Image (spheres, rainbow, N blue to C red):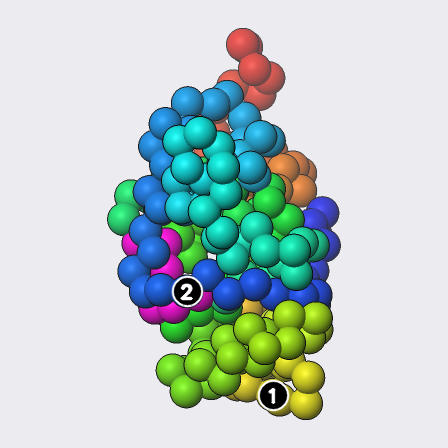
Amino acid sequence: MSALPPIPEVRGTAVVVPGDDIDTDRIIPARFLKCVTFDDLGPALFHDERFEADGTSKGHPLDAPEARGATILISGVNFGSGSSREHAPQSIHKAGFRAIVAGSFAEIFFGNATTLGMPCVTLDADDLAVLKATVASEPATEVVVDVANREVRAGDRVFPATLPDGAHGALLEGRWDPLGDLLAAGDDVERVARDLGYLPAEPGA
């Protein structure tokens, strides 16, 4: 049994980060990767697109007053391309986002985000445009990323969403973190180790 919570849906307000092919270096610049833990990566999210060298704001959508407290990030196609740095989804998660809606995702980014329990769902181009326009015109609109039913809802609009079967099952069954899954299977791990026959019964034996 998994010790992780299932994630049937994520709901909250959303913010649109416009553009396609947003790569991981834009999501979090390389100089922020020199860290021991991921805990402090939230403020570094999109840092160079949000701030001038002297720290003044460039007026990025993430820093708009209406974006405060948003839990769902919306963007374009090929989101998370570039390097495989897991710091990118970590910085999004540490900044408070719990789901991402886009036209498509880079494969490694998708996997790293899912491992955090952060659903990444895709909409077709027309629906994504409508969702972006809805959030842009009415930022207080509650957006629901319904993992269970593979749809996104905003106001009275319902958009069919795509989420691969593997991630869909992992999120609903609370098996989205392979390490957590491994730790939760302690007895089974020990049984397999015993059955292999060539591992010591006790560490150091």
Residue 18, disc: 2
Q: Is residue 39 left or right of residue 59?
A: right
Question: Quarter-wise, where is residue 51 in the image?
Answer: top left
Q: Is residue 177 left or right of residue 51?
A: right
Q: Is residue 53 on the magenta stretch?
A: no
Q: Position of residue 127 (x, y in %)?
A: 47, 85
Dominant secondary structure of the residues highlighted in magenta in the image: loop
Secondary structure under tag 2 reads loop
Residue sticking out furthest to the top = 204
* Front in this rendered view, residue 124 or 172: 124
Camera-side mark, 2 or 1: 2
Label 1 sits on what residue type? Val
Q: Is residue 59 left or right of residue 98?
A: left
Residue 182 appears anywhere in the view: no
Q: Position of residue 132 (x, y in %)?
A: 50, 75
Q: Is residue 131 above or below residue 192?
A: below
Residue drawn at the location 29% of the way across and 60% of the way down:
21
Label 2 sits on what residue type? Pro
Residue drawn at the location 35% of the way across and 64% of the way down:
19
Residue drawn at the location 60% of the way across and 42% of the way down:
94
Marks 2 and 1 in Cβ contact (< 8 Å): no
- Residue with the mark numbered 1: 158
The span picked out in magenta is 75-81
Residue 102 appears anywhere in the view: yes
